[in-house]
Amino acid sequence: MLNGFKNFLLRGNVVDLAVAVVIGTAFVAIVTAFTNGIINPILAVFGGSNELGLGFQLVADKPATFIQIGPIITAALNFVIIAAILYFVLVLPATHAKKRFGPSEDLTDSEVLVQIRDLLAEDRDSAGGRHGF
């Protein structure tokens, strides 16, 4: 039981995933600091003179009924910034590299089997038919 768990942890995919989660968490912290330090003060300019920020009050003189719109905008901007950076820094270059260095065409299963058959036939012919095919 423990041997299976050890094998699971030592697989390359698990380690790569753990690294990705740690780097992603650090990246989210950077983007959150950016939005808290720059975007939120800009949104506060539009919030009017109240201390609660950008939003509106449902019931007058009850601060607990204040609906904050600023944090929603901040979260949406966090998402858009993170998604854009991940796309332009990771996904787009990986796609470009795959097109450049990967196989030039996508083969169907049948085409791959035909290529395997042809390679086996060549191997058999070059060995003088000694494989017993």
Image (spheres, helix red, strand yellow):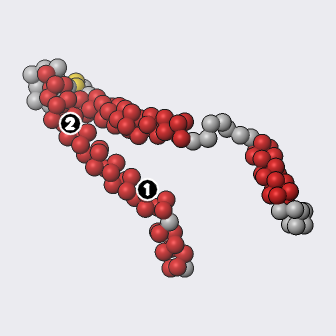
Answer left or right for 24 relative to 122: left
Which percent across, then down, holds residue 79?
35, 35
- Residue 88, above or below 132: above
x 13%, y 22%: residue: 45
**Which numbered dot is residue 91?**
none
Q: Amino acid at mark 2?
A: Phe
- Residue 58, above or below 78: above
Q: Residues within 10 Å of mark 1 (few under 14, many from 20)?
A: few
Q: Point out the tag, 1 or 2, that comes first from the N-terminus.
A: 1
Which percent across, then down, holds residue 85?
35, 35
Which percent across, then down, holds residue 10?
47, 69
Q: Nearer the viewer, residue 43 or 14?
A: 14
Where is residue 29, by image quadrant?
top left
Query: How many numbered circles does the render carry?
Result: 2
Circle 2 residue: 34
- Residue 9, above or below 103: below
Circle 1 residue: 17
Q: Quadrant of the C terminus?
A: bottom right
Q: Secondary structure at mark 2?
A: helix
x 17%, y 20%: residue: 46
Q: Secondary structure at mark 1?
A: helix
Real-space CA distance between mark 1 and mark 2, rounded to the nearest whole angstrom: 26 Å
Q: Amino acid at mark 1?
A: Leu
